Amino acid sequence: MLRLWLTGSTLISGLVILVLLGFLLQAGWPLLQSQGLAFVTEPEWYPYEELYGLAPVLVGSVWSVLLALLLALPTGLAAAILSAELLAGRGRGLVRFGMALMAGIPSVVYGLLGLWILLPLLESQLNLLTGRSLLAAGLLLAVMILPTLMVFSEEAIRGVSREQRDTALSLGLDWPTRLWRVVLPQAWPGIRVAVLLALGRAMGETVAVMLVVGSLDRVPHPFYNLLQPAQTLTSRLGREMAEAAVGSVHWAALMMCGLVLALVAMAVSLLAQRGGRP
């Protein structure tokens, strides 16, 4: 009975994914008919001129998510190590309570805080005309995914068995060596899950990013310039979905943005299944 239930659940899950991808592909088919796959590398997005290029949002999405992970991963992992290995009792509880509060804040509140605090700070400290930029989006996303990284990484680290720790101690290994040679390698599967969950939230975040990224459909020049306003897949969908007429090429282009986002999320999940220990 259990096996039958698991098989049915797997089939239903697969069917839902196929239906979702099929719907997005069917809705975006008019764009493929008019432009083919060239729209993926086109650098311009002007709906009123029938120009639909994904290059600006692809570059913006990659940079914002990459920057968020680069900032949040070492910070979250350090906080997890501190909480799991060095703090005890009340100190650990305070850290986890703070992270739980951060995780519970709605994304729109993070976006408003970004407008009120982060953007003016970037403008004044970096002498920018506007703080809306890829840098602002990356910094805000880093704060938003930090609780996920910290909480799940801490659980993975604390899940390493006491026997393995005692064995390493009996071999004369000091704490830093035990941490890097025993604890973290054993906790890596759980840490990997934390990274993927954080990556999923960063990729799918819409409102907060839309408020601070600038929503400029242009590839940064040069492409690594994080101080320019930009656009991401989610911010474009959030801003333009209500403006596009259902069945139009503009609507189809937005559906293709959703399809690309879904495919990237699936690719991340597949890589997670194939990943191994460091």
Image (spheres, rainbow, N blue to C red):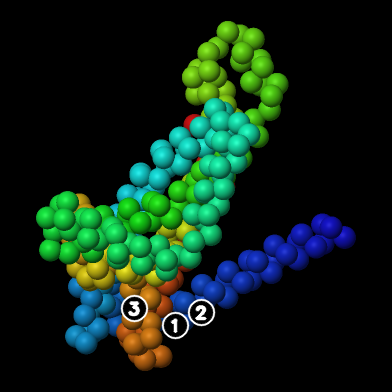
The residue sitting at the right extreme is 1
When asked about the image quadrant of residue 54, the answer is bottom left
- Give the Cα distance between marks 3 and 2: 21 Å
Q: Are marks 1 and 2 in contact (CB under 8 Å)?
A: yes
Task: Point out which mark residue 239 bears.
Answer: 3
SS label for mark 1: helix
- Residue at 23% of width from left, 56% of height from top? 121
Number of labels in the image equals 3
SS label for mark 2: helix
Mark 2 sits on what residue?
23
- Give the Cα distance between marks 1 and 3: 18 Å
Q: At label 2, which amino acid type do we have?
A: Phe
Q: Give above or below for 100 relative to 177.
A: below
Query: Residue 6: where, in percent of width, then height?
Result: 77, 59
- Give the Cα distance between marks 1 and 2: 6 Å
Of mark 3 and mark 2, the one earlier in the sequence is 2
Closer to the camera, 241 or 86?
86
